[in-house]
DNA sequence: CTGTTAGCGCTTTCAA
DNA sequence: TTGAAAGCGCTAACAG
């Protein structure tokens, strides 16, 4: 089964020239006589020659690939980000290697080191850890996406999490709500911490005291979020509104509300998703375009690969409040 | 910035031994004296040595990576499939390289060849083309996932699309529907063709004549699906039920129904998704677990990599009808 | 148990 | 314009 591969030297022999000249033809080097070029091209076609990319990369000391490292590629948000990065990479003929961190800070480092060992030319990372000083001397350009680097100056494409959450909660406040719950990821996740901060600020600005029992920065996945929401609904005085700090949580909060028939509770979520528009009521969300974020990150990385060595830049992608109904539900009576 | 990398020979020098012995230590070869081993390990730690994976792969003639090739990594179904494959790969320390085909058959071949050139050890593919005879002499094991190979005997992990669609449509028929629309992807996509076939069979078995105007195997994305659904609703005699052939289409059909307030039209979709349970009515679907499909495909591939050379096998992942409400809506009067 | 030699397939000197 | 030799960093073969 394992057929012997056609090597460059085989092509050279067939074309009656040297490996180096064949190499020149393959790499579009113009300094080759037309006749020789034609013979080599013929030989390539005849033998079905494909260059060995590993050998080429070894020789060149770098690989035409970039690594994308996110919490989980199965998460729709990161899947979209990655899809867009891949699209940009494709235009440049660059391969994308993905690695999911799952929630282990050590794995993040392992994965990044492994990619460096593969000599990827660049990295795009949405980290789960908060210390990236170990990347300080990395020769490989790194762009952070969605979550910012800790103890490291590096390029980043982010959204203003504090402002987004503040807007969302202020929106609820403006519709009369004062007992607003926060459901979000654990505070070890940076974006979660910032979004909770935005929630706090909005309440402070409205002169609404924080109620500890309504603040749940403890939901890793949708299952947690659902359970915590059910618990909120069982309180003697349930909240009249809920702010969810990310899509995964929204996907747990909403089933709980629907299950209990409590769609009279107002809701705003951080992150838009399919079907948000078709629920009853339709969902008011802070939209946080994964495609745009992915594209900006990829473009920044390729700028670095093209030699841009200006100081690290932080780009903020825009956020939009999309008003659809669930955030404008008035304060319920029960 | 580009620091010179530490090579194995540097480690060897620091440990006062040879490169080969250092290599043995790195690769856990037991035939090394304890003292030497310790010195090498010390040197590795001191110098921060990381093996160059490209060089290793070149020498070994294969790379510890697998390629995953799907229509789009941004599609939630394929994102989940890929996530699960990656999980299995992770357990074996194997890197995953992803590539999206977008809908171009030629790109499928290009991408597969490029991965072969990188010497990946195996491939998992969900194809968009229907002729894979060009893989006949590929030395790299390939497992097809979700969509079967054309003109090629190869491993495949599929679901029974015909049976699934037939079940879905028969379910609608059993609730009294006779004017059932089909909304699905173009017939060039195999799974779409099979699901349309299942739809046909269910109708034939019920003695319901096919109505051409209700059969729309023309929806590439959710935007198309939404528009075609709106058009269906505008017919003089709209259907009383709709069967959607895949999740992307469902995500277009449903907004159209909700937008027009036509949730009195029954609906069954092929493929479950987040929030299907929280819509009103909740969605009845044929569930087609992406995680399971991904896991089975990865396991089959690793079996091949471990030397299994039994004849190509086709595994059918189970399908389940999940009854939640939308499929049991009675025939509407208007 | 250890080291030397050779070579994976490619491209970069540097000379012809 | 072309080619021979050298070597990217690693490991398999084969001696010691």
Image (spheres, coloured by chain):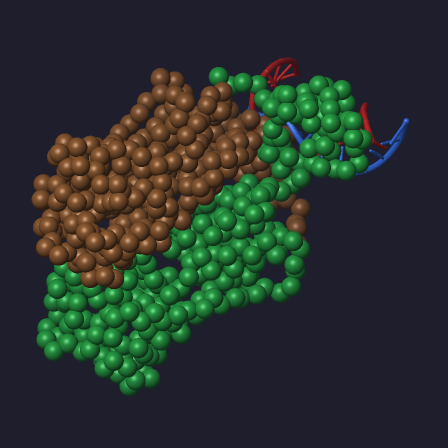
Chain colours: A green, B brown, C blue, D red
Answer above or below: position of A108 versus A207.
Answer: above
Q: Residue at x 42, y 61 (%)?
A: A289
A60 lies left or right of A101: right
Q: Residue at x 78, y 30 (%)?
A: A34
Where residue A200 appears, x then y in whole percent? 32, 77
Which residue lies most toward the bottom here? Answer: A207
B10 lies left or right of B68: right
Answer above or below: position of A333 versus B138.
Answer: below
Q: Residue at x 40, y 64 (%)?
A: A288
Q: Quadrant of the N terminus of chain B?
A: bottom right
Along the viewing direction, whichever of B165 and B90 lies nearer the viewer: B165
A81 lies left or right of C11: left
Q: Quadrant of residue B255?
A: bottom left
Which residue lies most toward the front here? Answer: B236
A194 lies left or right of A152: left
Along the viewing direction, whichever of A63 and B246 lies nearer the viewer: B246
One can see residue B219 in this view: yes
Where residue B151 appears, x then y in whole percent? 41, 22
One can see residue A225 in this view: no
Answer above or below: position of A323 versus A70.
Answer: below
Q: Residue at x 25, y 75 (%)?
A: A328
Along the viewing direction, whichever of A294 and B21 lies nearer the viewer: A294
Where residue D9 appears, x then y in whole percent? 63, 36
Q: Quadrant of the C terminus of chain B?
A: bottom left
């Amino acid at each position: 089964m394992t057929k012997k591969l056609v090597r460059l030297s085989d092509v050279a022999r067939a074309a009656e020239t040297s490996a180096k000249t064949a190499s020149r033809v393959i790499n579009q080097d113009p300094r080759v006589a037309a006749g020789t070029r034609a013979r080599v091209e013929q030989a390539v076609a005849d033998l079905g020659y494909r260059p060995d990319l590993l050998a080429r990369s070894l020789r060149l000391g770098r690989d035409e690939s970039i690594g994308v490292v996110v919490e989980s590629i199965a998460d729709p948000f990161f899947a979209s980000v990655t899809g867009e990065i891949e699209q940009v990479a494709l235009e440049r003929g660059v391969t994308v290697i993905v690695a999911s961190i799952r929630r282990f800070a050590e794995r993040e480092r392992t994965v990044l080191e492994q990619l460096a060992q593969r000599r990827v030319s660049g990295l795009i990372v949405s980290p789960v850890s908060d210390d990236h000083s170990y990347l300080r001397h990395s020769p490989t350009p790194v762009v952070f996406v969605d979550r910012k680097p800790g103890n490291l100056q590096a390029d980043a494409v982010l959204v203003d999490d504090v402002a987004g959450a503040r807007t969302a909660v202020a929106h609820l406040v403006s519709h009369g709500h004062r007992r607003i719950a926060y459901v979000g990821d654990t505070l070890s996740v940076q974006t979660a911490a910032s979004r909770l901060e935005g929630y706090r600020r909005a309440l402070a600005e409205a002169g609404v005291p924080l109620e500890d029992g309504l603040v749940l920065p403890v939901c890793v996945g949708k299952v947690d979020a659902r359970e915590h929401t059910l618990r909120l609904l069982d309180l003697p005085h349930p909240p009249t509104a809920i702010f969810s700090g990310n899509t995964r949580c929204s996907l747990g909060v909403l089933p709980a509300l629907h299950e209990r028939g409590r769609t009279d509770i107002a809701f705003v979520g951080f992150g838009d998703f399919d079907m948000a528009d078709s629920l009853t009521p339709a969902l008011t969300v802070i939209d946080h375009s994964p495609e745009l974020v992915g594209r900006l990150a990829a473009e920044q990385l390729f700028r670095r690969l093209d030699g841009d060595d200006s100081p690290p830049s932080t780009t903020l992608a825009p956020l939009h409040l999309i008003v659809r109904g669930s955030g404008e539900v008035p304060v319920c009576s029960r």
